[in-house]
Image: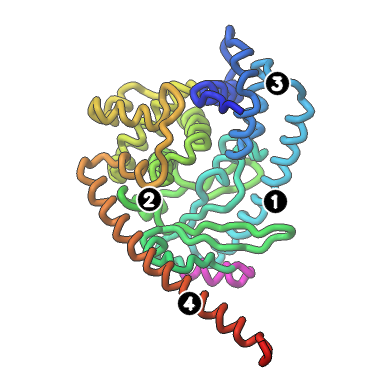
Amino acid sequence: MNQPDEHAVDWAFTHALRAYLEPPPQGLDPSRFAAVRDAVLARADRQRLMVPVLSGLLALDVAEDESVLSAKTREALFASTALSARAQQLSRRLTDRGVAHAFLKGLVSDPLLFGGRGHRGCTDIDLLVAPQDRDIVAQLLREQGARQFDFPGLEATVAASHGRPWHWPTPGAQLVVDVHTGLSDQPLRDIGPAALDERVAYDTGSETWWGLAPGPWLAFSAANLAGDGLSGRDKQMLDVAGLVRRFPGAPAEAVPWAQRAGAAHALWALLSLVQRRLGARVDPAVLDELAPPAAKAALLSALFGIDGAPLAIRGMPGRALIPDQAGAAAAYIARWAARRAQDATGLLTTYLSRSRARSSLLSSRRSPND
């Protein structure tokens, strides 16, 4: 079976997102959507953006039936309500213990930017705290029955990351809580502590959410997309488009934060992407201030997919190509290779240890006549 053209899928997917955000333009060819419909919906499902994409396709008159959207909308609202309740519970307990915190990503963008109906899909809790509060948060989570993820043999990689994921038991599922003590890892510079100092209490009418101020939030979106090796492009596009619509001054406020993180070029690419693909209005002077040299701009344009499907470059290579400083990539690759070498040794030690344990267990179970 032939795979659909990635550029055609990306074109249809981003037009559906744009139609969710604003009235769609006239004259789009419905057959271009029909040819890649299944691939677009599969991508929306993977990214947990099914409601925005289905809504956009209906607005474009290229979806069949509103009943599917209605069902997905109910599912999204149910999941969002349950997740929000647990996050608010955690927030109250952190506040009671004097722990400054801010929620990140979909958990705060959905209620603040998209009405709190689960349209911006989110399955876990991303939480920023100060490094000195990590032990307090760990103790609180343990009291709730949570346990920290174990990564045997990957100690070097875990030690280099600012994030620590936890399993938090909830009715019918295991909720993941990612506790962050920073906002970006190498090769970028961390702006987490400073951003936490300027956190904002957003009042949505029914709830209050602690989150990053619009400038640091936008800079974090660029740094996070770079740190994820560009794997979260669709969600970040939607978040940034919503953020710029809600807070028009956010791009200008984000400039010094992105420069401090070494992610000004990444922010230029992300803002250019949402301007080009989702119709966000960004002051040209801001883009000029952030713009990289022409060769780097061409590379980032291809990586981010500003004018088409993004290049299939993910993980370490994607992260290495992002930083503003020309020498940062080589230094990062060297550190990455050293950590991987340490991890390889750790994984081998773990494997041999477990193999010996299994052999001993089997030997103890054999009968004397075997």
Which is nearer the N-term, disc 3 or disc 2? 3
Q: CA distance from mark 3 to mark 2?
A: 39 Å
Amino acid type, mark 2? Ser
SS of the residue under disc 1: helix
Helix, strand or loop: magenta stretch: helix
Left or right: 209 with respect to 326?
right
User: Is 251 positioned to the left or the right of 247 in the image?
Assistant: left
Residue 11 percent coordinates (x, y): 52, 21
Sequence-first disc among 1 and 3: 3
Q: Nearer the viewer, mark 4 or mark 2?
A: 4
Q: Quadrant of residue 172?
A: bottom right
Please name the residue shown 36% across and 37% down the image. 254
Task: Return the residue at label 2.
Answer: 184
Q: To which residue does mark 4 refer? A: 353
Q: What segment is highlighted magenta in the picture? A: 135-146
| Observer-nearest of 333 and 84 | 333
Q: Which mark, residue 131? A: none
Q: Secondary structure at mark 3?
A: loop
Residue at left offset 65%, top offset 40%: 118
Determine whether label 3 and label 4 are within 8 Å by CB: no
Which residue is under mark 1?
82
Which numbered disc flags the more N-terminal residue, 4 or 2? 2
Element marked by disc 2: loop
x 49%, y 56%: residue: 101
Q: Which label sits in the foreground, 3 or 2?
A: 3
Residue type beneath disc 4: Ser
Using the image, determine if residue 327 lies above or below residue 135: above
Q: Position of residue 114 (x, y in %)?
A: 60, 34
Helix, strand or loop for disc 4: helix
Distance from disc 4 to disc 2, alpha carbons, whole Å, reads: 34 Å
Q: Amino acid at mark 1?
A: Ala
